[in-house]
Image (tube, helix red, strand yellow):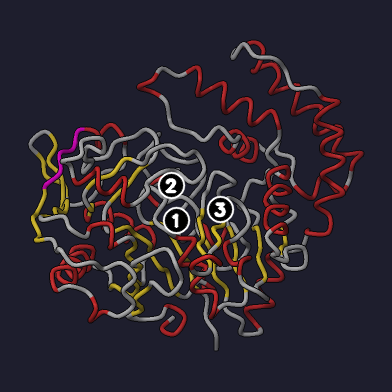
Amino acid sequence: MQKNVVVIGTQWGDEGKGKIVDWLTDHAGSVVRFQGGHNAGHTLVIGQGDDQKEFKLNLVPSGIIRDNIECFIGNGVVLDIKHLQKEIAMLENDGIAVRDRLFVSPGCPLILDCHVKLDQAREAKRTNDKKIGTTGKGIGPAYEDKVSRRAIKVYDLLNLDTLKHKLKDLLEYHNFVLTNYLGTDPISFEEQWLELVSQAEFIKPFIVDVSARLHALNDEGKGILFEGAQGALLDIDHGTYPYVTSSNCVAGQASAGSGVGPNMLNYILGITKAYTTRVGGGPFPSELDIDDQRSPGYQMSHKGKEFGTVTQRKRRCGWFDAAALKRSAMINGLSGLCITKLDVLDGIDTLYICVGYQSNGTEYELLPLGADQVADCKPILIEMPGWKETTFGANQWDQLPNNAKNYLLKLEELCGVPLHIISTGPERNETIMLHHPFEIA
């Protein structure tokens, strides 16, 4: 019987989940997004040479690039319909059939203009050392409305009479904050109302009971792939708070955010880079200088093309943090590891791995929870020899240099999670499969 797989980022996001999700869909019948919003960025490279195409997806599940794969946006996602319209148009312009394969839960909370304005005005009001590094896309305020039980959800678009009253109350609340506390202009009720009426007509054909459909697919033995966004160390509960995202990014959210029981999550694949990156603010114990050409961080940044898919900000880079990975393994219940961007380390003479931290005379084997505590941590590093040979494009274990193999096996040992997949480039065939998640799930 076919099983189901959850793909999770185990660092601070940007681990290369999109490629792996796309690659694994040859064994799946569907792909589900279950948290976050269009603050996620998944880059897919399809084809070779002159036929190569690059797709940057923020909201639509990565499986949409594969033919015959059903894609679902679960109730745990906050939905900006304007962005969804743009992303669908982009895909259709590239010849990707979307409308008969993409489905949206009626339970998704909507991101409205007031949420975007609140997000940006709040970040602008913070002093530089207190900035969160939000994408400014309204994600946080939309989740706040959900928790405060005043959100407008997709199913509200099916009853315009009720929707009008809900929107009036919502804007009255948020416009008070915008004008009296943040000192910005209010959102026009009439403009937002007309926009929602138009969006209601657009979204109706996509609405489906995602929970019921996923249970039916599971009963039919069709594998389901649950696609996480961001990374576990950005989780609102388990990350380096407050420098986190506004949703739960851990594997357990696949259940709550799509409407399936935990017994339907058979295998958890943790995606991690062969080094560590972070976008935006927040502590980063193993961080390196990315501007000094003599620093390994410079190579990681430039060779790894470390720029945020959503924001285009430079990603901060540093040595692999095994102590942080052990924290991720615990909170996600990882079944196996996929290590990406191994080739970025090619040519670095000596590599280091963070195996713990020192803080005020105390040693820690796991990444602490609060940002203030993590900020006081100094990395405890061990040394590993690098390799001169190229690993780019390798698709067999035996093609890797011995020092690269030793480095990977050391990461496996330190993290306590078996190594199942290695990605050595952006294309589908640039992958070493040691154990297939769907076959051992």
Q: Amino acid at mark 2?
A: Asp
Tell me the tag on residue 250.
Answer: 1
Contact (Cβ within 8 Å) of mark 2 with mark 1: yes
The residue that mark 3 highlights is 56
Q: Nearer the viewer, mark 1 or mark 3?
A: 3
Please state if 227 lies on the left or on the right of 161 as rendered.
left
Q: Nearer the viewer, mark 3 or mark 2?
A: 3
The secondary structure type at the circle numbered 1 is loop
Q: Which residues are magenta?
A: 376-380
Extreme-right residue of the structure: 161
Looking at the image, is 389 positioned above or below residue 168?
A: below
Q: Quadrant of the C terminus?
A: bottom left
Tell me the tag on residue 75.
Answer: none
Q: CA distance from mark 2 to mark 1?
A: 7 Å
Q: Earlier in the sequence, mark 2 or mark 1?
A: 2
The secondary structure making up most of the magenta span is strand
Q: CA distance from mark 3 to mark 2?
A: 23 Å
Q: Earlier in the sequence, mark 1 or mark 3?
A: 3
The residue that mark 2 highlights is 235
Residue 288 position, x and y percent, is 21, 40
The residue shown at (65%, 35%) is 145
The residue shown at (10%, 60%) is 384
Q: Nearer the viewer, residue 34 or 41?
A: 41
Q: Quadrant of the N terminus?
A: bottom right
Q: Amino acid at mark 1?
A: Val
